[in-house]
Image (cartoon, helix red, strand yellow):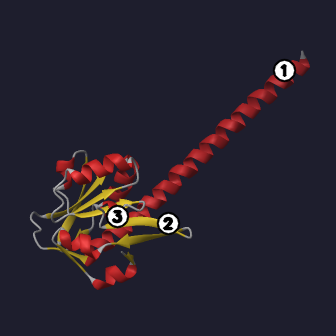
């Protein structure tokens, strides 16, 4: 009887340890994603300083985020109280291709590539800087975040930026990997 109580205690203890370790692992993964989106929000903010929107209507510079609630909440928390070009930054969630045309910057974190390609194909991207995660620079993105030797960098296409009616500074081109 006493051995059975000890064995039951060991099993319960091991289950609790496993649950705690799983929770710590998950919170670490959420923390890493959170840090990633905080870093990306700094990049996005710096992009606003180096890209010029000629037809910038409204009182806000709008950044839209597609398909990632964690990215949306982190970027919104980081940028919504900042200003660019004398305008408040407004963060919106992109849920349809039509939403992308309302954005100065449309950010599409890595998710379903086919869905992203469908959005790109059916959106009016004039006057919108399209930023993605992963290497989608050849698939329509003007800027794509990539990882190179465990370091976040970005590829940038001056041609694609100019095709949508935007002007980009040479300093931003030199900070990225031009394609």
User: Where is the N terminus found, in terms of image quarters?
Assistant: top right
How far from the left and from the top, in percent, is residue 130?
27, 62
Residue tagged 3: 138
| Tags 2 and 3 touching, CB below 8 Å | no
Q: Judging from the image, what secondary structure is the residue with disc 1 in?
A: helix
Which numbered disc flags the more N-terminal residue, 2 or 1? 1
Query: Residue 147, which numbered label?
Result: 2
For the point 45% across and 65% down, the residue is: 146
Residue tagged 1: 5
Query: Residue 15, which numbered label?
Result: none
Total residue callouts: 3
Left or right of residue 68, residue 52 in this image? left
The quadrant where residue 54 appears: bottom left
Tell which tag, 2 or 3, sits nearer the viewer. Answer: 3
User: Where is the C terminus found, in terms of image quarters?
Assistant: bottom left
Q: Is residue 71 visible?
A: yes
For the point 25% across and 54% down, the residue is: 120
Q: Judging from the image, what secondary structure is the residue with disc 3 in?
A: helix
Question: CA separation, marks 2 and 3?
Answer: 16 Å
The quadrant where residue 177 appears: bottom left
Left or right of residue 145, residue 51 in this image? left
Which numbered disc flags the more N-terminal residue, 2 or 3? 3
Left or right of residue 20, residue 85 in this image? left
């Amino acid at each position: 009887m006493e051995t059975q109580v000890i064995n039951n205690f060991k099993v319960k203890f091991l289950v609790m340890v496993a649950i705690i370790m799983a929770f710590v692992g998950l919170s670490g993964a959420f923390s890493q994603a959170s840090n990633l989106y905080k870093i990306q929000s700094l990049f996005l903010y710096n992009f606003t300083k180096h890209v010029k929107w000629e037809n910038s209507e409204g009182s806000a510079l709008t950044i839209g985020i597609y398909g990632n609630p964690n990215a949306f909440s982190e970027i919104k928390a980081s940028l919504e109280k900042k200003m660019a070009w004398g305008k408040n930054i407004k963060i919106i969630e992109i849920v349809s291709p039509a939403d992308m045309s309302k954005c100065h910057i449309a950010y599409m974190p890595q998710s379903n590539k086919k869905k992203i390609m469908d959005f790109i194909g059916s959106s009016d991207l004039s006057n919108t800087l399209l930023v993605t995660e992963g290497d989608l620079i050849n698939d329509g993105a003007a800027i794509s975040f990539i990882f190179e030797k465990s370091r976040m960098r970005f590829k940038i296409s001056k041609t694609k930026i100019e095709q949508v009616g935007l002007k980009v500074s040479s300093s931003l081109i030199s900070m990225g990997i031009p394609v």
